[in-house]
Image (cartoon, rainbow, N blue to C red):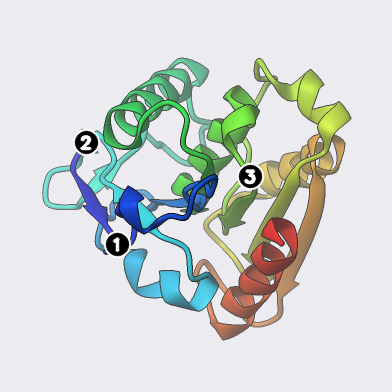
Amino acid sequence: MHALRSPRSAPDRASLTEGQDEPPLVVLLHGFGSHERDLPPIAPYVCDLPWISLRAPLELPGAGAAWFPLDLPHEPRRDDIAEATRRLWEALDGEVGPQRTLVPLGFSQGGLMALQLLRTRPERVAATVMLCGFVAEGSEVADARLSEQRPPVFWGRGAADQVIWPAAIARTASLLPQISTLTERAYDRLGHGVDERMLSDARAFLDAALG
């Protein structure tokens, strides 16, 4: 997968004091039909952490890329999501190594992928930010562990979103309180997009979650 990095995504280890760990790395995951340059402009509004932005593996002719096929109103296929998750972890392990602590931040389909990272390897994830996203159908390997640990998750969405279908919103609203310490926000007069309110709340969430 093609990746963009912030200047601070790979800090000089010589600049770290003895015993100091690398800061968490924000993983920016774009939506269906977009690309790796979509989310970096919002990163400074959400946090001061280094980031990496990955391009999804499925190229769409003349329309950017996707993490997995999407044929609304049909639900995504679980096999496609599982393969996308495997490829995303493979790319992250290759780009940043298997130990770096991550903060997945995804929009729409990328929001689902952000939650997939949490639901498959929660030990790697410090906090999760999902913007206008949703959860996949069915359970994941780490859901039982997450129900005990309750890691921090932010879910922001537009109250007027006409893209994410009602069943997906209902499923997300049901699952997330069971597997996370959820901060949920729905914004009046906002459709399938982000605005200053959402970004401000996401920043406050990360400031609190990461201390």
Eye-nearest disc, 3 or 2: 3
The residue type indicated by label 3 comes to Ala
Under mark 2, the amino acid is: Met
Q: Is residue 136 visible?
A: no
Under mark 1, the amino acid is: Ser
Q: Is residue 20 visible?
A: yes
Q: Secondary structure at mark 1?
A: loop
Left or right for 173, reference 81: right
| Mark 1 Cα shell of 10 Å, populated few (<14), some (14-19), many (≥20) | some
Which callout, 1 or 3, points at the residue further toward the start of the chain?
1
Residue at 35% across, 27% down? 93
* Residue denoted by label 1: 6
Marks 3 and 2, Cα distance to the nearest angstrom? 23 Å
Q: According to the image, label 3 marks what residue? A: 126
Q: Tell me which residue sits at (54%, 45%) in the image.
A: 19
- Residue identified by numbered label 2: 1
Give the percent coordinates (x, y) of residue 15: 36, 58
Q: Earlier in the sequence, mark 3 or mark 2?
A: 2
